[in-house]
Image (spheres, helix red, strand yellow):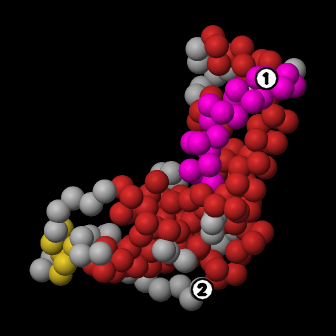
């Protein structure tokens, strides 16, 4: 961590307003993007982001200046988003468990050119909340199914099923956008 950021973090620990504003400006975009991946809309994401910063400012004194500060912030954002998800959308995760795993682009599919990150993000946003949450945690954040199951208070098979179904739906969305076709 560079010395400027260390000074800002220490000043935030002393509840100095200028430092809190500077920390917010520096990291709010990154943390908002994380929150948005787990919520229904921008308004919910902003509510979660506000809660994230309350937690950050409250617990800044526990940060030991070891490891990545950004990683520490990301972890708070993910955990806060998951808590929000559990409170508001728990029933979405209790869908019937299916079996079978699919790649987003299965063997025998043709990719019709490179698609941009915005195309993929748009498709991910179209997923039902349960599918999107598990997909984000597994594919983007890198959690294992066991960890996801523990975070979301669901069975490990539910996590696997939600990921599988998310991939199938993403494949369909990419086909609709003519970004992939069946061979």
Q: Nearer the viewer, residue 95 or 37?
A: 37
| Residue 58 drawn above or below residue 2 | below
Instruction: Quickly name the residue at label 2.
Output: 95
Please report the residue visible at 76 percent of the width from the left and 37 percent of the height from the top.
Answer: 56
Number of the label disc, if any, that sits on residue 111: none
Q: Secondary structure at mark 2?
A: loop
Mark linked to residue 18: 1
* Image x and y of residue 107, in percent: 19, 73
Left/right placement of residue 162 relative to residue 109 reads right
Question: How far from the left and from the top, in percent, is residue 63?
Answer: 74, 27
2 or 1: tag closer to the N-terminus: 1
Q: Residue at x 68, y 16 (%)?
A: 6
On screen, residue 30 versus residue 99, left or right, reads right
Q: Is residue 39 magenta?
A: no
Left/right placement of residue 155 relative to residue 111 reads right
Name which quarter of the figure residue 28 lies in. top right
Image position of 75 (left or right of 58): left
Query: Magenta region, mostly helix, strand or loop?
Result: helix
Q: Quadrant of residue 22?
A: top right
Does residue 95 show up?
Answer: yes
Point out the image quarter for the C terminus. bottom left
| Residue 5 coordinates in the image, percent (x, y) | 65, 19
Within 10 Å of the Cα at label 2, are there few (<14), some (14-19), or many (20+) other Cα atoms?
few
Q: Decide which of 96, 50 is in the foreground and name it.
A: 50
Q: Is residue 98 above or below residue 55?
A: below
Task: Give the residues drawn in magenta, as a range.
Answer: 15-35
Please tell me whether mark 2 or mark 1 is closer to you in this view. Answer: 1
């Amino acid at each position: 961590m560079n010395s400027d950021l260390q000074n800002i973090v220490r000043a935030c620990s002393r509840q100095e307003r200028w430092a809190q504003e500077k920390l917010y400006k520096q990291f709010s975009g990154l943390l908002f993007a994380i929150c948005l991946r787990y919520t229904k809309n921008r308004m919910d994401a902003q509510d979660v982001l506000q809660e994230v910063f309350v937690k950050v400012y409250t617990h800044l004194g526990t940060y030991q200046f070891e490891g990545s500060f950004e990683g520490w912030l990301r972890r708070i954002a993910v955990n806060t988003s998951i808590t929000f998800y559990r409170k508001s959308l728990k029933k979405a995760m209790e869908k019937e468990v299916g079996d079978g795993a699919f790649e987003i682009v299965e063997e025998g599919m043709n990719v019709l050119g490179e698609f941009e990150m915005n195309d993929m993000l748009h498709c991910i946003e179209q997923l039902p909340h349960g599918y999107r949450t598990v997909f984000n945690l597994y594919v983007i954040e890198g959690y294992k199914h066991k960890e996801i199951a523990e975070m979301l208070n669901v069975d490990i098979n539910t996590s696997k099923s939600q990921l599988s179904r998310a991939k199938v739906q993403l494949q369909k969305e990419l086909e609709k956008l003519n970004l992939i076709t069946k061979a």
